[in-house]
Image (cartoon, rainbow, N blue to C red):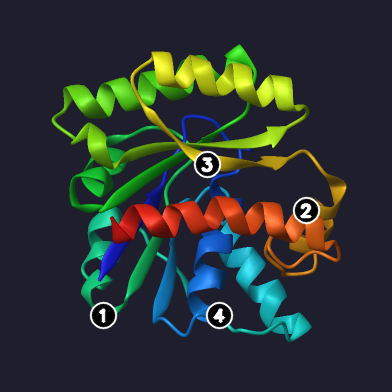
Amino acid sequence: MAVIAFVSQKGGVGKSTLARALAREAAHSRLSVKLADLDSQQSTSTDWHRLRLSQGVEPAIPVQAYASAGAALREAEEFDYFVVDAPARASKGTLEIARVADLVVQPTGASLDDLRPAVRVFHELKAAGIDIGKLRFALCRIGTEAEEADARVFLLEAGYQVLEGSLLERPAYRSAQSLGKAVTETSFQSLNKRADALIGDIARCLDA
């Protein structure tokens, strides 16, 4: 059993995108998986789940909305992967999830407006006693290789590990999700391969 939490200070940086992609890849690999949607204000993953079902996209991925982190985590032991799509703002629930998670992934864009608050979230978790070894950044909505390189340096200098690869800013990723698919299920193999590399590194962190 592994609990993987996707957290963020800001909305729209890729939290739900990565949570859904990891859940999809786990299901595709025939692991038992559940995606827990704790973002009650947005319900992004829950809405995506309904869309995926209506479109008949396989594999099917169990997604459930929960009112609290505690309610969700009580079911975690029933699955190989329990993927948590946390609320879009750091909160007491974020810390509760981080304490029990095997891996905490925080997506971020490459601008300083994204990077600075993202680093503060991990600083707060570290100060609260969370093991820095299970904190990872994921770079999303990247425009250029230079932008990715600069963001990676910023995060590494802040003292945190960054997952290999990144998600580019591409309409095809948005289009796929609008059809109930994950970012590993677009119509473009090059984009799928790039997303697979990022999701695969998350899995490798869990196996380490």
Q: CA distance from mark 1 to mark 3?
A: 29 Å
Q: Secondary structure at mark 3?
A: strand
Which residue is depicted at the point 38% across and 18% down?
120
Give the amino acid type for the residue marked by disc 3 in the picture: Glu
Q: Identify the residue under disc 4.
A: 28
Q: Secondary structure at mark 1?
A: helix
| Residue 24, position as x, y percentages in the image | 56, 71
Q: Is residue 175 visible?
A: yes
Give the amino acid type for the residue marked by disc 4 in the picture: His
Q: CA distance from mark 2 to mark 3?
A: 19 Å
Q: For residue 52, what is the image quadrant?
A: bottom right
Q: Identify the residue under disc 1.
A: 78
| Residue 167, position as x, y percentages in the image | 67, 43
Q: CA distance from mark 2 to mark 1?
A: 31 Å
Q: CA distance from mark 1 to mark 4?
A: 18 Å
Q: Earlier in the sequence, mark 2 or mark 1?
A: 1
Q: CA distance from mark 2 to mark 4?
A: 19 Å
Give the amino acid type for the residue marked by disc 1 in the picture: Glu
Q: Earlier in the sequence, mark 3 or mark 4?
A: 4
The N terminus appears in which quarter of the rendering? bottom left
Q: Identify the residue under disc 2.
A: 173
Residue 164 marker = 3
Q: CA distance from mark 3 to mark 4?
A: 21 Å
